[in-house]
Image (tube, rainbow, N blue to C red):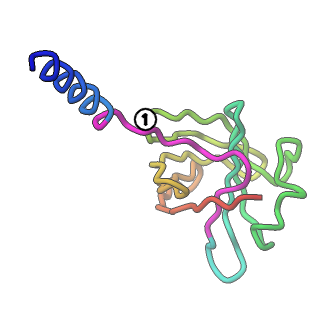
Amino acid sequence: MKKTAAALSALLIILAFFSFTPAGCPLDYKGIYAIKLDGEHSAVLRFYEDGTVLASSSVNDYMDVMSWFNKDNKDMVLKGTYKVKKCVVRFSVSGMTGEQKYEGTINGNKIDFELKDKDSKKSTKRTYTFYAL
């Protein structure tokens, strides 16, 4: 009986540990995160495993951006380095068209961001959804 009680206690401790440990909030690297801004424009983000993040907007369907939405395209993308701590992702991106700061919470295939434009000092909230490519 004592062995059963001890085993049960150990099991409950292990289960309690796992139930309070966050499951993690991974980013997906095999596609883009996007949001439709209006009938014509979309905003897109792309994360790389090396810590690089790209941001841009597009008048194309966001599923057609992969031909130009990459690290080598310095003219049409803002580039930066991201950090993820717990379920929060933070980064600044900059390029020829400006600079923006992002802070967001990863929720499955969505990220809820607050972004701030350096020049205008304006802040906006957006929810980006992941699209596999």
Give residue 11's position: percent from left, percent from top. 25, 27
Front-lying residue, 67 or 96: 67
Front-lying residue, 32 or 41: 32
How many marks the image carries: the answer is 1
Q: Quadrant of residue 39?
A: bottom right
Residue at 60 percent of width and 48 percent of height: 100
> In the rendered view of the protein, which quadrant contains the C terminus?
bottom right
Residue, far front:
1
Quick check: 34 left or right of 106?
right
Front-lying residue, 35 or 29: 29
Residue 18 in the magenta stretch? The answer is: no
Residue, far left:
1
Residue, far bottom:
39
Vertically, is 100 above or below 41? above
Vertically, is 126 above or below 54? below
Instruction: Report helix, strand or loop for mark 1.
Output: loop
Q: Quadrant of residue 3?
A: top left
Residue assigned mark 1: 86
Q: Residues within 10 Å of mark 1 (few under 14, many from 20)?
A: few
Give residue 84's position: percent from left, percent from top. 52, 35
Residue 21 in the magenta stretch? The answer is: yes
Residue at 78 percent of width and 48 percent of height: 96
Residue at 46 percent of width and 33 percent of height: 85
Report the span colored magenta. Answer: 19-35
Tag 1: amino acid: Lys
> In the rendered view of the protein, which quadrant contains the N terminus?
top left
Quick check: 26 left or right of 18?
right
Vertically, is 9 above or below 133? above
